[in-house]
Image: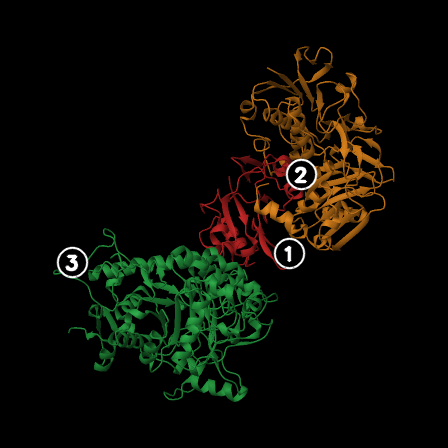
Amino acid sequence: MKQYVIIGNGVAAAGCIEGIRSVDAEGRITVISAEKHPVYCRPLISYYLENKTDLQRMHYRGDSFYQDNHAEVIYGRTVSAIDKDAKQVTLDNGDTLSYDALCCCTGSSPFVPPMQGLETVQNKFNFMTIDDSLALEQAVTPESKVLIIGAGLIGLKCAEGLHSRVKQITVCDLAPRVLSSILDDKCAAMMQKHLEQNGISFILGTSAKEFSGNHVTMQNGTALDFDVLVLAVGVRANTALVKDAGGNVNRGIVVDDACRTSLADIYAAGDCTEYHDISSDTVKVMALMPNAYMQGHTAGVNMAGGEAVFDNAIPMNSIGFFGFHCHTAGAQPEGCEMYEESDENHIKRLFVKDDRLTGFMLLGHMHRTGIYTALIRNKTPLSSVDFDRLRIEPQLSALGSAYRDKVLKGAV
Amino acid sequence: MKRIYVKEEWCLGCHLCEYNCAFANSGMTDMVKALRGKTIYPRIQVEQDENGVTYAVSCRHCKDPICVKSCIAGALSKKDGVIEIDHSKCVGCLTCVLVCPYGAVVEDGSGVAQKCELCMKNTCGSPACVKGCPNGAIVYEDRGDAE
Amino acid sequence: MNFYPEFEVVRNDSRCIRCRVCERQCANEVHWYDEDGKIMLSDESKCVNCQRCVTLCPTRALKIVKSDCRLRENANYSDQTIKEIYRQAETGGVLLSSMGNPNPLPVYWDKILINASQVTNPPIDPLREPMETRVFLGKKPDHITRNEDGSLDTKLAPQLSLSMPVMFSAMSYGSISYNAHASLARAASALGIYYNTGEGGLHEDFYKYGKNTIVQVASGRFGVHKDYLEAGAAIEIKMGQGAKPGIGGHLPGTKAVGDVSKTRMIPEGSDAISPAPHHDIYSIEDLRQLVYSLKEATEYRLPVIVKVAAVHNIAAIASGIARSGADIIAIDGFRGGTGAAPTRIRDNVGIPIELALAAVDKRLRDEGIRNNVSIICGGSVRSAADVVKAIALGADACYIATAACLAMGCHLCRSCHTGKCNWGIATQRPDLVKRLNPDIGSQRLINLMDAWRHEIKELMGGMGINSIEALRGNRLMLRGVGLTEKELEILGISHAGE
């Protein structure tokens, strides 16, 4: 009977369990979970604050998930080392576990740049885990003034989550726009306007110069009082275990399409990895939940002796604030053409290069956008479809009757 | 398993399937009460191609459902081949809308996602779009499963 | 001159959900959605009362009613008469109409009642005992002949074998749609009966239904060629049609498109106007020549039908046809339908089928030539009861077309001649043609015929008759109500109570 060990208990781990079980019903699966919660998806923690979900509903899978999949979870433990030669891992309590195949789903950790006086701030929080969210929930009152450092996905979702619980929210970021990693200036401006209309304040293009208790002074001279500080500057992949074991690591753990690391029988999946983005033809840490699941599943299948690849990863984000959504995917490579359509409440930007859709940004109107995403993912030559009609509206009808017959008249 | 298939040669583009779908999933017993004065958010949608040919598109209940794999809340799942959504778990992130290559998952008007569940969770008994199509252009039958 | 529309669209706004199905389904463009007022509006002057919108409206928010705005009442000059005069004064044209004569002329079927057995001769239960509805159409021998060795000479003239005494009568591809033809062909094939091409040729896709097809040769000879003649199970020479005796068919150029023109062998867009007479037929002898030409062309394999409209001298005409070599006579009464006919002709020419049928059957019997031919009765056979009455009056089988169209969805709006049939039957517009799915159309025709066959058996059983052959010409099974002595005499039946 094969021994599978999965380090981490996030979505990639859940994918890994399901991947293993799709091939091997017998092998023993052990999951080592630092957090004392069954698998949940991190992005839900802002919805928790918003009361759109609760601790029970946040569970990624049903209550009997581990039982059904015959997986044992060791809660509250971390792995301190991997011994690739002995094929075993050592836990923080000194226990060891042998493995035939190991998957590293260690995720990422908040990255906090050094800021002067930060240690003087009492109420400061990260926003990564349920426990962070629970702690933040306890710390805020309807009178709280919250300062969030970081206007990225995490910072802004935190702002939305806290919105109805506090008096004032200010978000600051060194970048001159919100969601700088996924939106360009025009799209970011529309999103920022929407957030501002909902009462979120911004201080952009500058960073904190100095904290002093509940007071901050920015590099540009702005000063602000706050009660609660949330640090959402960014995350870093947790690569140490694989690196220490001699594995190939850059910004993330390097994995191939089969989610293998450079070490024998050691796989990795999820936010801790870096992998190939086919839309920009670059290798990067994408830290995206759908990709994490698909990597985990791929790793699981391969660990159990099956064959699977995840070779069409692209960055993509679906994110919304106060009912206003944005969908982005792919990349905007050098020299791409842009097709744009916009009015005051919506923007559609499609990026085209070399007869391919390489990326898009859509704000305000999210209808059937997956049809665009599939064009990027499948690298569909635009000359083979009616792009003039597709640009206007995503529709299968523009993909040709042969495709339509295939997907609508037969099982897919 | 049985799935919904279209016969575009018989589709009239009347859009009744959309209204029958919206009604079937409204939880109400009267269509007027359910739909009058409201914008409908059907789980099946009529498309028209450049030659005027129309046909309805709904969830393919595909073998390898990327929506299920992408759902951040674990709200989408596949049971006996049918891809279902647990509305109580859906937080409305719309990642499923972003990834479905058929455009078959849509927002329901209240912020959460919805999709065709073959009328298995409503009182209709069998797919309302199929039952209500005046010209037999939507059928519910077993054409095997994808390899 | 503008009139108040004949029909009113009554929309119950409290039920309307603005789904716009009515708008999308009306080829006459009666309905539209007003974005500003968020309301459905309608132009009733375009409405033909085909009920497509009413039928498809998912919330029953619509009805079409006859307008009560009428010209001053006048028993002589009716509202319709006056408006027709206005229209003709405006256009100088012949008025056109479609489908059968709608006027309140006598329907003899409704004045004839059927017998049932009581006490002395028991009825038969068709659910428990065998019941034969099969009929054979064609020339029957008068007497038995034997071969030299004494065995029976079983050589028969070609026959049509029908599982029940009903067939689908002539409607051309052109006057009706491809899908209507497909529905009829598939149903006839499944039922073991026949449908009739009409004068429009046979689309190449339907040659495969040839065993259940009657191919028609009419005065225009449209679509007639050797393969066509050989494709069918019988050939019908159309001399006349009940809806328009004395004139030929007329397909407007707008319907002669695509495959229709190809099948008819005429240029696209050209009017297909069949002459009133066959230019080679001015006597029974001429008719005989055509009958035998067709038999010759098909090596005497196929029975030949001669179809005539029921007109004043129908008995004498039928007698002539029976001597012409024809195997079957089809008589079409004045209430028979049409895709387009001059209104005055449709409404004023010809005689009722019931009287014509009785007269023909009697005449042929009297002359001892009844076995020369089978008789098909058409021109508004509306139900299984009409079929039973027709058989008892002397018919071998009935032709139905209006009832078949109704089964396929027709709502008898009588606007076939506009080519905008909202039910996909009497149209060639592709977007309308596709409204008739032959899977559904053929199944509904099969259902209708199955239902009629059951009813025929029940009626036969009631009379104590277990074979349709035993009913033919059995006028003792019929009684008239409210008919004059003369009418009873022609029908050859007694009055109820006699």
In-front residue for pair B133/C195: C195
Mark 1 Cα within 10 Å, few/some/many (few <14, many 20+)? Answer: some
Secondary structure under the numbered disc 1 in the rendered image: loop
Mark 3 Cα within 10 Å, few/some/many (few <14, many 20+)? Answer: some
Could you give the CA–CA distance between mark 1 and mark 2, rounded to whole angstroms?
42 Å
The kind of residue on which mark 1 rests is Asp
- Chain rendered orange: A
Task: Please tell me the colour of chain C.
Answer: green
Could you give the CA–CA distance between mark 3 and mark 2, rounded to whole angstroms?
86 Å
- Give the label on residue B49, or none: 1
Q: Which residue is mark 2?
A: A161
Choose top left, top right, bottom left or bottom right for residue A28.
top right
Front label number (3 vs 2): 3
Choose top left, top right, bottom left or bottom right for residue B85.
top right
CB atoms of marks 3 and 2 within 8 Å: no
> From the viewer's perspective, is residue C246 above or below residue A279?
below
Front label number (1 vs 2): 1
Secondary structure under the numbered disc 3 in the rendered image: loop
Q: Left or right: where does residue A216 sit relative to residue C383? A: right
Could you give the CA–CA distance between mark 3 and mark 1, rounded to whole angstroms?
65 Å
State the image coordinates of residue C184 (x, y, percent, origin top left). Answer: 44, 61
The kind of residue on which mark 3 rests is Pro
Q: Which residue is mark 3?
A: C122
The C terminus of chain C - image quarter: bottom left
